[in-house]
Image (tube, helix red, strand yellow):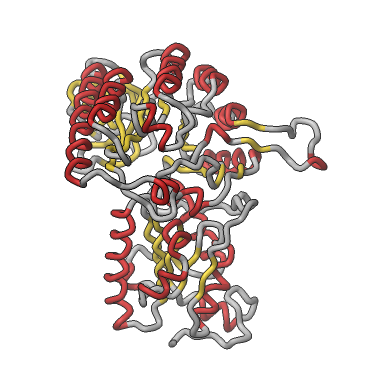
Amino acid sequence: MQLKMEQTERIGDNTMATQAHILTRKLYIESYGCQMNTADSEVVASIMLKEGFILTKDYKEADLIFINTCAIRDKAEQTIRNRLLLFNQQKISRPDLIVGVLGCMAERLKTQLLEEEKVVDLVAGPDSYRDLPNLIHQVDRGHKAINTFLSKEETYDDIEPVRLHSNGVTAFISIMRGCNNMCSFCVVPFTRGRERSRDAYSIVREAQKLVDLGYKEVTLIGQNVDSYDWHPAQERLTGAEKRVNFSKLLAMVADIDPNLRVRFSTSHPKDITDEVLYTIKQYNNICKHIHLPVQSGNSRILKLMKRTYDRVWYLEKVEAIRAILGPDCAISSDIIAGFCSETEEEHADTLSLMDHVQYDFAFMYYYSERPGTLAARKYPDDLPEAVKKRRLSEIIAKQREHTLAHHQRHMNQPHKVLIEKYSKKSADFFQGRNEQNKIIVFPKETHQIGDYVEVWVTDCNAATLFGRSYSTV
């Protein structure tokens, strides 16, 4: 390789030759999947910048390409494989190019990726990003490199993320890693390991730093934020340092600045508590929106999914949200169509639950069997794809009706909007979100990205609200 090091050198050695060497190298990162992957890529960028790499937005000029992957559905993995084919074209003309696969797909497939995808030089799971400099060093020496060790402690809480593609207004803060919920359809416990909560005070410090930099909104993210539970080591347990649950963490972040909007995702119906709901009610800067995945509206299917609640339990949680936070609190969801053995009557239960809850919006999919999960081992994937797609189309159509109805109720009302970026269709318009997470588009006028603006909504469709601003908050 043109940039190959001597065997005694490691990336990051404090020698002038090594530093000069790595400063010539550019890093390109692509992220796919959930918000956790976006946050992980920002941790990776921080690690690599400290090793002397330079970030680039153009993969064609990169010396190192990382693709941070999702394994939640087969379609996501096929997208990654198609990207690897593209990067292989670059490698044909530049054999010294290093291509690494990170994240959940790396954890799930491990050495299989190195064997099947010849373009891949490096594979790193979600808990091994600190080892990336060493893995790159191995590749520089002419070897393939892999680390997919799952940790019981790693939270990266001492690493300050590099905000990739940042608008300087909104940011994600990862508060925990892994998942202890063994839903039968899900690969996350196998690709991200067991649940562990990040140091609460490191989260507050990160949020404070973002405020100091001018950010106006943070989203606290985790696979199941309501099960957040951190307490310091016993020898550090003094004064205010005591156990912190999710309700307390929300309050700690909201107290940083009343002008800092606080969002969170994702909640689990079995873990969200009235204490959390009352905390949201107490703070004006905690957004009134809860993402509460249901997956199915039928109790038998929920039991097969190992969701640990039934239809009645879920609807009681929805009623608690409405009772404590009122009808203006937005509720969104995840819904899976065509899970193993689902009947037409059970599919109808999902549609009827949607009618009852009237979700503001939802993420909707048809079931995709994932190797290694309980469902793949125990339940036949026995529904034809045509049936799954038809049921999904019915779910999507119903949700479109509900979303449009919610948007129509927002018309002829004022909304406090945080401007995040230009509208996709015109640089003469801005777009932002209200506290219910609804996208609102309005004329640019004299406002700036990062402003809070009062917008009077005058029109809508099933995707967007439209209006005109009348004051800056």
Depth check, front residue: 14 or 353:
353
- Residue 357 in the image, given as x and y percentages of width and height: 33, 20
Task: Describe residue 332's horizontal placement relative to residue 21 as left or right.
Answer: left
Whether residue 38 is visible to the viewer of this picture, yes or no, is no
**Position of 100 relative to 405 (above/below):** below
Residue located at (59% from left, 53% from top):
156
Q: Quadrant of the C terminus?
A: top left
- Residue 285 in the image, given as x and y percentages of width and height: 48, 25
Residue located at (73% from left, 40% from top):
232
**Position of 161 relative to 95 (above/below):** above
Residue located at (81% from left, 35% from top):
238
Residue 466 figure quarter: top left
Residue located at (70% from left, 32% from top):
243
- Residue 48 in the image, given as x and y percentages of width and height: 52, 65
Say how many tags the image has: 0
Q: Quadrant of the N terminus?
A: bottom left
Whether residue 350 is visible to the viewer of this picture, yes or no, is yes
Residue 175 figure quarter: top right
Task: Describe residue 158's horizontal placement relative to residue 90 as left or right.
Answer: right
**Position of 102 relative to 139 (above/below):** above
**Position of 8 relative to 433 (above/below):** below
Task: Describe residue 10's horizontal placement relative to residue 165 as left or right.
Answer: right
Depth check, front residue: 386 or 419:
386
- Residue 55 in the image, given as x and y percentages of width and height: 43, 64
